[in-house]
Amino acid sequence: MKILVINSGSSSLKYQLLDMESESVMVSGLVERIGEEKGELTNKAFPGTDRQKVTELDQPIPDHNAAMRLAIDLICGGDDTICSLDEITAIGHRVVHGGEDFHKSTVIDADVINAIEANVPLAPLHNPANLTGIKVAVELFPGVPQVAVFDTAFHQTIPPHAYMYALPYELYEKDRVRRYGFHGTSHKFVAGEMAAILGKELSETNMVTVHLGNGGSITAVENGKSVDTTMGLTPLEGLVMGTRSGDVDPAIHTFLARNKGMTIDEIDAMLNKESGLKGLCGMNDMRDIHKAIEEGDERAKIALGVQTYRNRKYIAAYMGVLGRVDAIVFTAGIGENDDIVRSRSLEGLSLFGVKVDEKVNAQRAKKPLKISTDDSAVAVWVIPTNEELAIARETKNILQ
């Protein structure tokens, strides 16, 4: 069984072809800067093996339709490609927002496409790109099963007291304004990996999963189910991220409109693209921020403090929500690679019996790594996420 995974983002497209018998990656690629003057594509065949072949292209890629066709052509388009079109068993698509329509992954048909389109107002940057990936794949692979794996699906178990906003109820009834949560595929994947490491059934495991990348979110997982998460109606709520503000006083919108003459669109762009770490210190790459701190940059120091303080507040809050916590799990780019952020995000949690082995925490590992001491009341682990593998597994399970 060969499954092609498509992750079509707002300005990029990631893809992987996996052989599901061994769960090995046959092809991995990334198309970036879609719609800009000069696009970029890197395609790796058989990564990590002696058969590795890297194809790099640098040319304008006008839209996601062109990006999809370029990727498919590299995988299946000629004598020098990896496999023929008819060898692909199924295609799994990451879809950011399923609203309340989808509680789990599902086979794509006309009704599913219409439902994804209906949820575009909830994810105007991502759902249209996801739809383009789906429609092009359906055209190029007629008859091949396509499966939608929703970022929001894992969080559909969150109870009303955690997903409702204290707004006029009609906004929920008519417009479905509520907390949805995102990064669900990643949170579900590392939760399953953590339960297996602990030797417990996922349904018997409580944990706090911490996904920290350019975007970030934290989830409270109770008996294997998401019961609260930091992102809300959109991915803007919650943690301090690379360019997103996270939690702010809602009245800031009114203040900026009245005192700065800013429009709603300008405020939205500022909160999503010019805030977070970038807004605080002008940088959104943690490597640059750490270097600037070493050189005495006070704003970089403030940015790190604001970010890790917010992380710590939510971790502690979710430990309180769960009561019993078997593990805290860090994942994604920053969560997996930045020991300073991990350490500072756990400061002060000794009240809960959390103890970190700083020597182990400073290590780099591509495999799961326990960073808590043996006498820590709560295990703390770093587990690499693999959203593409998670999507492929979901696709395989749905079809079987």
Image (spheres, rainbow, N blue to C red):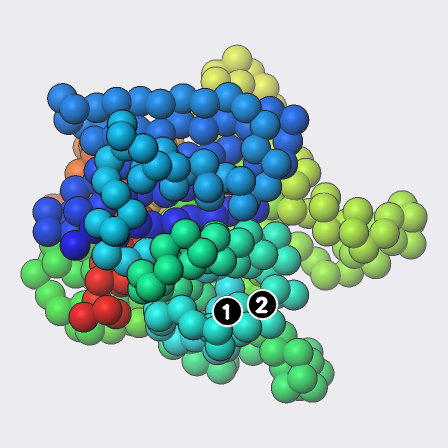
Q: Residue furthest front?
A: 79
The amino acid at mark 1 is: Ile
Q: Residue at x 62, y 74 (%)?
A: 177
Q: Position of residue 239 (x, y in %)?
A: 52, 50
In what element is the residue under mark 2?
Answer: helix
- Vertical position of residue 215 compared to residue 49: above or below: below
CB atoms of marks 1 and 2 within 8 Å? yes
Residue pictured at 33% horizontal, 50% vertical: 5
Q: Residue at x 23, y 56 (%)?
A: 89
Please tell me in which quadrant of the rendered image residue 157 appears.
bottom left
- Whether residue 220 appears in this view of the structure is no
What residue did someone put label 2 on?
Answer: 117
Of the 4 image quadrants, the one containing the C terminus is: bottom left
Position of residue 195 in the picture relative to residue 232 (left or right): left
In the rendered image, which residue does mark 1 sit on?
Answer: 113
**Identity, as a three-letter code, of the amino acid under mark 2:** Glu
